Amino acid sequence: MARDQELKERWEALVTLLSNRFADGDTLDLDAIIYLVGIQELGQLHRKFKKDEKLDLMHIAICRLLEPFGYYEFDYFDDQGWPHYKILEQLPPLKAGEQSVLMKEALVQYFIEKEVLS
């Protein structure tokens, strides 16, 4: 199967799975799934987050998702248990569609690692 087709099918399966689990079947978008990864990585699943914390959660998720691609490396946990990453390599300039494909690829890989997808 072509790589693009495989990514498309895995992405659709992931969106369906997570939408059914967390959004009562409403379709989660890319940002919502990134946000879920941020909550998972922080490990503070049952609390409310302020607006600025929600942005921080998305940042955590993006760093974690792009870590296997060599862009970020985990550095440390702060006193509140929030993970911090250091930049290893700047992301190349990407068009919006290319950014979306990269993040979908990273999310699919992440959920395969977590054994949520096969």
Image (cartoon, rainbow, N blue to C red):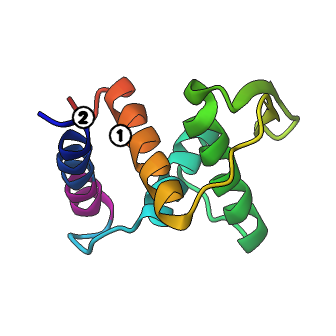
Q: Amino acid at mark 2?
A: Leu
Please identify the quadrant where the C terminus is shown.
Answer: top left
Residue 16 falls within the magenta-colored stretch: yes
Disc number at residue 117?
A: 2
- Identify the residue shown where x is 17% and y is 37%: 2
Judged by its main secondary structure, the magenta piece is helix
Who's the residue at 35% across and 40% down the image? 108
Q: Which residue is at the far left?
A: 1
Q: Please say whether residue 18 is one of the residues in the magenta stretch.
A: yes
Q: Nearer the viewer, mark 1 or mark 2?
A: 1
The residue drawn where x is 28% and y is 34% is 116
The stretch in magenta equals: 15-22
Residue 77 or residue 113, whichever sits in front: 113
Residue type highlighted by circle 1: Val
Q: Residue 63: x percent and y percent? A: 67, 40
Give the vertical position of 42 relative to 17 (above or below). Answer: above
* Residue 57 spot, x, y in % from top left: 66, 54
Identify which residue is drawn at 63% across, 56% down: 58
- Tell me the quadrant of the picture where the N terminus can be found: top left
Mark 2: few, some, or many residues within 10 Å (few <14, many ≥20)?
some
* Residue 108: numbered disc: 1
Please, which residue is most extreme toward the right here? Answer: 79
Residue 99 lies, in percent from the top left, at 53, 56
Q: Which of these two is toward me, 4 or 8? A: 4
40 up-or-down from 93: above or below: above
Q: How many marks?
A: 2
